[in-house]
Amino acid sequence: MAGKCSNPECAAPINCHEGKDNHEECEFWIKQAVLKPAKSFATQKPGKAANFPWSGEAFKVGEISQVSTRSSSIILGIVGKADAGKTTFLAMLYTLLLKGGEFEAFNFAGSKTIKTWDELYHKLKIQKDKVKFPDPTPAEYIRLLHLALRDAKGRLKDILLSDASGEVFSIWSQKREHENAENARWIYKHANAFILFIDCVDLIQRKNLAKTEIIDLAQMLQYNLQDRPVIAVWSKSERKPEIHPKIKESLKEELKNLFTNYNEIDISNFSSSDPDILVHKNNISVLDWLFFEIFNHRLGDLPENNEPIKRDIFLNYKGK
Ligand SMILES: Nc1nc2c(ncn2[C@@H]2O[C@H](COP(=O)(O)OP(=O)(O)O)[C@@H](O)[C@H]2O)c(=O)[nH]1
Ligand SMILES: [Mg+2]
């Protein structure tokens, strides 16, 4: 009695990559003999079509087996000091996807952490000249936000984005083994790729002090990084022109020299035009570049900040 899935990443018959309770009902399952339908989840009540074993809340570290059983999920580690704009980036990313934004090589196919995404979306309220930001990330744990993406061949990829409070990274950047840096160590150990936040406003206000902190963090990240990709994200970059040019250039240069598999991009949550590349395009391009480095099938290059965008993905966004 045999059968197999045409998707090499699928763990069926143990667990269907597409999330089907009965893997034989999956379009990718190649039947070679009659198999008994298997219930994947003990919690499934008979007669109920949709009774999900997840709550929709962000995953904690111990819960990620809920997605990682169906495929090896990709973890993107978001790294940066407190207040750098990490959580807002996640909120903006989801907002853009809801408004029709698209990744280059993947379609958005759902999420098992929809409740937390939704909370972030509702808290990031954008009106003309005014943005209300999400609440600060709770300090004690790492949240992992899930995106299910489908590639051109229709296969699912599970992506988990980490959201941890920035304090742990500041501690970690000074002392790798510090008892309060556990969350940073977990992200460093498990992430397949990293998004390193550079807070433009902090660089304007605290100048070289802010730069030194970013370099400390980057050096910690670089240690034993192997070939994991890193993208430096200049957040709040509608204010990037106010950073002292010497600080900006030296930081850019030093980061470039630290990493091999590296890129950088400017993002913002304030739009000066509609659409605005920094807001409506670049927040998604951060992931496009990482996906290309991870899966090696991105279609184009990162856009220049002044490159015209082809689709008006954000029409009707302002003023909502
Ligand atoms: N000027 C500017 N400020 C921003 C932007 N995005 C976020 N902020 C500010 O940064 C603060 C912290 O953002 P948050 O996402 O919570 O940072 P985190 O601690 O890194 O998760 C917000 O409350 C805003 O005041 C932006 O695009 N431009
Ligand atoms: Mg946060």
Image: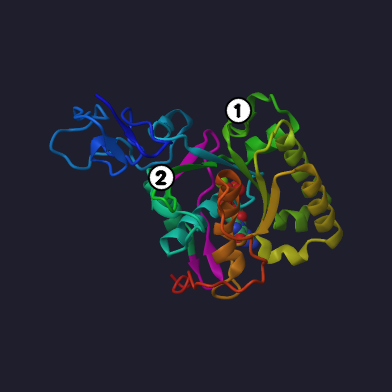
Question: Which segment is the magenta one?
Answer: 126-147
Residue 136 rendering spot, x and y as whole percentages: 54, 47
Is residue 53 or residue 2 the one in the foreground? 2
Is residue 241 or residue 27 the one in the foreground? 27
What residue does disc 2 label?
A: 156
Horizontal side of residue 308 vs 256, given as left or right: left
Residue 191 rendering spot, x and y as whole percentages: 58, 36
Horizontal side of residue 285 vs 176, given as left or right: left
The colour scheme is rainbow
**Element carrying mark 2:** strand
User: What residue is at 72 percent from the left and 54 percent from the top?
Assistant: 202
Tell me the amino acid under the disc marked 1.
Answer: Glu
| Residue 269 in view, yes or no | no
User: Does residue 207 lie above or below 54 as drawn?
Assistant: below
User: Does residue 98 lie above or below 275 as drawn?
Assistant: above
Q: Quadrant of residue 230?
A: top right
Horizontal side of residue 110 vs 269, given as left or right: left
User: Does residue 235 lie above or below 311 as drawn?
Assistant: above
Residue 14 rendering spot, x and y as whole percentages: 33, 27
Q: For residue 182, which numbered disc appears in the image?
A: 1
Mark before the other along the chain sequence, 2 or 1: 2
Q: For residue 139, which numbered disc appears in the image?
A: none
